[in-house]
């Protein structure tokens, strides 16, 4: 498990140990807490092809670099 801060939001990148919920066993999952305090989980194995937690951390940081409008202030800053 790795904890990452990207785009002003905290993320937790993990590899699934059980086949339950989002994704399959062995998939790389990122959990992000949104503006409303609700947790969002995304499967980085399917979305970005990540095979390790280290690759998942890199993909999370790269995504927030490419999309600076997604931040703590909300999904889209400036109403965009």
Image (spheres, rainbow, N blue to C red):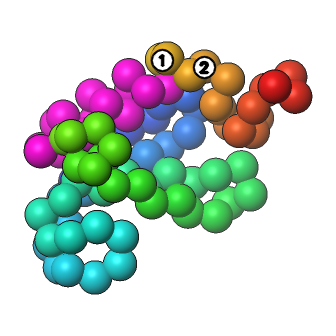
Q: Please tell me how many numbered marks the rendered image carries.
A: 2
Which residue range is magenta in the image? 51-64
Q: Which residue is mark 2?
A: 68
Disc 2 + disc 1, Cβ < 8 Å: yes
Q: Tell me the crowding category of disc 2: few under 14, some 14 to 19, or many 20 or more residues within 10 angstroms, Cα based.
A: some
Q: Is residue 58 magenta?
A: yes
Is 33 on the left-hand or right-hand side of 75?
Answer: left
| Residue 72 in sight | yes
**Residues under labels 2 and 1: Cα distance?**
6 Å
Q: Residue at x 21, y 40 (%)?
A: 49
Determine which of the numbered discs, if any, sits on residue 65 in the image. 1
Q: Residue at x 49, y 17 (%)?
A: 66
Residue extending furthest right? 79
Query: Is residue 50 depicted above or below 42 in this figure?
Result: above
Q: Residue at x 87, y 28 (%)?
A: 79
Is 71 on the left-hand or right-hand side of 27?
Answer: right
Which of the 4 quarters of the picture holds residue 58?
top left
Instruction: Give how far across and how far down residue 68 sits, in percent.
Output: 60, 19
């Amino acid at each position: 498990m790795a904890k990452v801060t990207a785009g002003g939001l905290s993320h937790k990148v993990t590899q699934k140990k059980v086949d339950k919920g989002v994704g399959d066993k062995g998939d790389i999952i990122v959990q992000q807490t949104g503006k409303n305090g609700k947790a969002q989980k995304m499967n980085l194995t399917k979305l970005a092809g990540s095979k390790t937690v280290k690759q998942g951390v890199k993909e999370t940081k790269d995504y927030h670099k490419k999309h600076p409008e997604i931040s703590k202030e909300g999904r889209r800053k400036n109403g965009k």
